[in-house]
Image: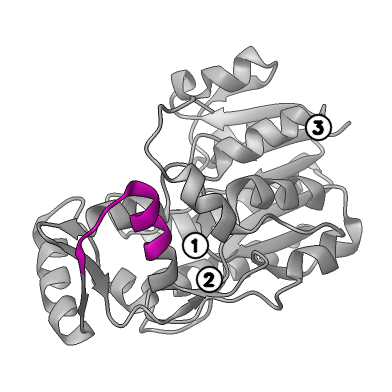
């Protein structure tokens, strides 16, 4: 049984990771700004510490006495919190706190596509964060995932926003290749990494057992919801200018220019068997899961 500090526990992937840690019988500590959002973890025995994961003092205190730290703290948009503050400075603060507390290992969850490229601000920020963590000298593993799917949130929100009037809008051609993985399987990978000292110092790219296009995933959503609308593919030249304009005046625009560019690029792991080769088990097939789990249903709270 390990003592684990989880950062980002109330986020899209973090909720699944928190429950997976508890399911495994580990001691879980979460650092959260809003303790009410962590009530489901506290009921199951987790220790809830109130504080900001980007505050060095708060994080240093939360890290005392734990063996491992898992971080899913990141932002996909540059506002209201900036890429620099969260995606770049955050991993540096994490590494420094982990070194001071003497933790055995850190697991940083990043994204496939992380690279230094001025055309992709989000991907660049994730790459820079990985570098900042490494500079601290902490023993760590970086896990990069393709698209993570769940019953709510994530890319599902994008699909819901893409239903406009009589059309189902697809940015660009919709032919970029993805390797989606279910949140439950991603969470299992993350928790199992804690017990894998052989992965320390490595960057591991992970995805599901299928390679599909963005349009194919969108079709899963349309079929699951029984939506019968004409698909309208909008070229980048028509999407980028309004995306830039909306981003300038709206706090939460439907889509940003950076997101438009990213959705046109392939997002694939190291191989179709990336999970089985690293962890020895095969993840679920999203194509069989989505038609059932993306149908409208009451939310469970987990």
Which one is in front, 137 or 235? Answer: 235
Side (left or right) of 219 relative to 274: left
Question: Can you say whether 66 is above or below 288 in the image?
Answer: above
Instruction: Give the alpha-carbon distance from disc 3 to disc 2, as whole Å.
Output: 32 Å
**1 or 3: mark nearer the eye:** 3
Marks 3/2 in contact by CB < 8 Å: the verdict is: no
**Residue 228 position within the rendered picture, expressed as x and y whole percent measured from the top left:** 24, 58
Neighbourhood count class around disc 3 (C-alpha, 10 Å): few under 14, some 14–19, many 20 upward: few
Q: Residue at x 81, y 43 (%)?
A: 102
Is residue 34 in the magenta section? Answer: no
Which numbered disc, 1 or 3, marks the residue that appears first in the sequence?
A: 3
Neighbourhood count class around disc 2 (C-alpha, 10 Å): few under 14, some 14–19, many 20 upward: many
Instruction: Give the alpha-carbon distance from disc 1 to disc 2, as whole Å.
Output: 6 Å
Instruction: Give the alpha-carbon distance from disc 1 to disc 3, as whole Å.
Output: 31 Å
What residue is shown with label 3? 24
Marks 1/3 in contact by CB < 8 Å: the verdict is: no
Marks 1/2 in contact by CB < 8 Å: the verdict is: yes
The boundaries of the magenta stretch are 218-230
**Mark 1 residue element:** helix
Question: Can you say whether 202 is above or below 105 in the image?
Answer: below
Q: Would residue 264 be seen by someone viewing this image from the given angle? A: yes
Q: Residue at x 53, y 40 (%)?
A: 53
**3 or 2: mark nearer the eye:** 3
Give the main secondary structure of the magenta stretch.
helix
What residue is shown with label 2? 128
**Residue 187 position within the rendered picture, expressed as x and y whole percent measured from the top left:** 67, 46
The disc placed on residue 88 is 1
**Residue 282 position within the rendered picture, expressed as x and y whole percent measured from the top left:** 78, 59
How many numbered callouts?
Answer: 3
């Amino acid at each position: 049984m390990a003592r684990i500090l989880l950062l980002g526990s109330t986020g899209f992937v973090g909720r699944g990771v928190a429950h997976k840690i508890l399911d495994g019988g580990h001691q879980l500590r979460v650092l959260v700004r809003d303790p009410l959002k962590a009530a489901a973890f506290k009921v199951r025995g987790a220790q809830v510490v109130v504080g900001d994961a980007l505050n060095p003092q708060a994080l240093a205190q939360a890290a005392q006495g734990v063996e491992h730290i898992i971080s899913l703290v990141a932002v996909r948009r540059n506002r209201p919190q900036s890429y620099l503050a969260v995606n770049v400075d955050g991993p540096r603060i994490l590494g420094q706190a982990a070194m001071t507390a003497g933790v055995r290992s850190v697991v940083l969850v990043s994204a496939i596509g992380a690279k230094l490229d001025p055309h992709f601000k989000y991907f660049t920020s994730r790459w820079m964060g990985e570098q900042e963590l490494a500079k601290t000298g902490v023993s760590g593993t970086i896990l990069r995932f393709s698209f993570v799917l769940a019953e709510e949130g994530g890319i599902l929100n994008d699909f819901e926003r893409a239903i406009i009037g009589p059309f189902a809008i697809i940015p660009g051609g919709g032919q970029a290749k993805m390797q989606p993985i279910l949140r439950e399987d991603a969470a299992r990978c993350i928790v199992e990494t804690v017990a894998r000292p052989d992965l320390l110092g490595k960057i591991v790219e992970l995805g599901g057992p299928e390679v599909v296009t963005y349009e194919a995933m969108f079709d899963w959503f349309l079929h699951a919801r029984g939506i019968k609308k004409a698909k309208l593919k909008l070229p980048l030249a028509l999407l980028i200018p309004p995306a830039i304009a909306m981003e300038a005046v709206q706090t939460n625009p439907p889509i940003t220019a950076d997101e438009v560019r990213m959705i046109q690029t392939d997002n694939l792991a190291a191989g179709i068997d990336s999970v089985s080769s690293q962890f020895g088990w095969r993840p679920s097939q999203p194509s069989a899961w989505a038609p059932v789990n993306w149908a409208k249903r009451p939310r469970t709270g987990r």
